[in-house]
Image: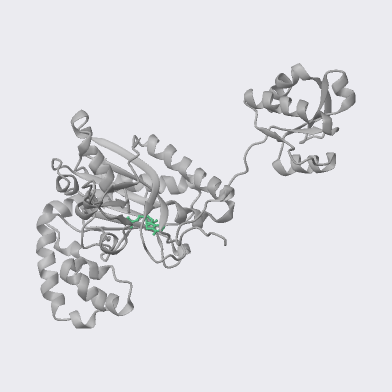
Amino acid sequence: MTFRSPTGAEDLLPERAAAFRRIEAAVRDVCERFGYREIRTPIFEYTELFERGVGETTDIVEKEMFTIPPRSEDGEASLSLRPEMTAPTARALIEHNLHKARPFNKLYYIGPAFRRERPQKGRLRQFSQFGVEAFGSDDPRLDAETIQVLAEVLRAAGVKRTEIRLNSIGCGVCRAAYRDALKARVKADLAAYCPNCAKRFERNPFRIFDCKQEKCRAISANLPPIADALCEACRGHFAEVRRSLQAAGLDHTLDGRLVRGLDYYTKTVYEFTSDDLGAQNAVGGGGRYDGLVAELGGPAMGAVGFAAGIERIALLLGDGAAAPAACDFYVVVIRPEDRGEAFKLASRLRTEGFAGDLDYEGKSVKAQMRSANAAGARHVVVLGPDEWARGEVKVKAMATGAETAVKAEALVAALRGRSA
Ligand code: AMP
């Protein structure tokens, strides 16, 4: 019997892990440059948080959560693996009163999220998300800032081409009026839509814009866009977001169909997409969610953020994403009986801060040299019987091929001098 990883959950083998780490380093660097501070929340939460915070009518909550049912013995409520990190971040903000210590908080996160979806290219059941959330401001420039953060992360990670799609879905007031108008207009045509749309429409009419089916898209293409129904304040907000994007040098496309799947969005919504990704073409997406903190029991406050997927960025970068690890030295022994001395040398060099390796497989001298080459070692330290009898080793600089005899006690200084 052999075991496999669970459906939709992948092992990150060393090269892929290195590619992920490079993307994560870009995330940390850019987020911190923009003044966001890291937050780490648990990978599971009480299920109710997602029901309230993501919305009970969403696919995520309706169908895709990994839920651990409540245990009657201890009376603990149902738990779910997090399908996203915005609701947990807002929960943590409220629980720890971060908004009282500072009325304005900029946070970022990186970590796994879980959705029980049908796996396909770029869609997993355990995937890695990063994102930012800024709490405590209504300023439209902040919406633009979050978009710039994602654009910069993608640029720093080496992603070449993505498109920024932008829309506004209005506030509680104009959105509600538009929703009623939309309901009235679509009701007559509902039979022409797919069964999924018909079902979704009852609970959240905006979701008909989300449908990927051609026939549904064709009908909804004739519906008036929400942008035309925005109130004065939302219109002004959206115009300022667009001006700020221009000021930041970010091209974008207006997309009246973009409504995003989660219930908590208000005003600005955006998505970064790439044609190089196939069906799952979203790299990341976000928007403003001014109602969420109050919905979760905190004070009313403006908030905006995005989440993006590391797997999809790794797909866009291809195999070239991982840079090989640095290797300062490789210790080669001529005689097997000197392996103990080689171990001592290597351990000293490593505690001095050098990166390097040695043979543990009893390889021939030639094979050890091949390992040194494969590791990309900058120096090979040869421990040969004649030199060792004089308390010396031979150091070969791999770039030039130059060999020098070095006293064992001077090895650290010699490598340091040459590594510099
Ligand atoms: P969402 O909150 O659904 O917009 O997700 C934000 C980003 O997370 C998406 O744009 C994707 O890059 C990524 N993502 C969402 N679901 C998955 C999944 N099942 N597998 C891989 N990446 C995902």
**Looking at the picture, does residue 62 appear above or below residue 264?**
below
Q: Residue at x 21, y 47 (%)?
A: 75
**Looking at the picture, does residue 321 appear above or below residue 182?**
above
Q: Quadrant of ligand 1?
A: bottom left
Q: Residue 388 sits in which quadrant? A: top right
Q: In this image, 290 relative to 349: left or right? A: left
Give residue 235's position: percent from left, percent from top: 17, 55
Q: Is 6 in front, or is 320?
A: 6
Q: In this image, 56 relative to 379: left or right? A: left
Q: How many marks?
A: 0
Q: Is 47 in front, or is 118?
A: 47
Tell me if residue 402 can be seen. Answer: no
Q: Residue 41 sits in which quadrant? A: top left
Quarter occupied by the C terminus: top right
Tell me if residue 188 can be seen. Answer: yes
Give residue 164's position: percent from left, percent from top: 36, 56
Q: Most extreme residue toward the bottom, as rendered?
A: 192
Q: Is 228 in front, or is 259?
A: 259
Scheme of image coloration: one colour
Quarter occupied by the N terminus: bottom right
Q: Is 121 in front, or is 124?
A: 124
**Looking at the picture, does residue 188 appear above or below residue 15?**
below
Q: In this image, 174 relative to 168: left or right? A: left
Q: Residue at x 43, y 45 (%)?
A: 153
Give residue 399's position: percent from left, percent from top: 76, 36
Q: Residue at x 42, y 68 (%)?
A: 279
Q: Most extreme residue toward the front, as rendered?
A: 73
Give residue 286's position: percent from left, percent from top: 30, 52
**Looking at the picture, does residue 340 appear above or below residue 77?**
above
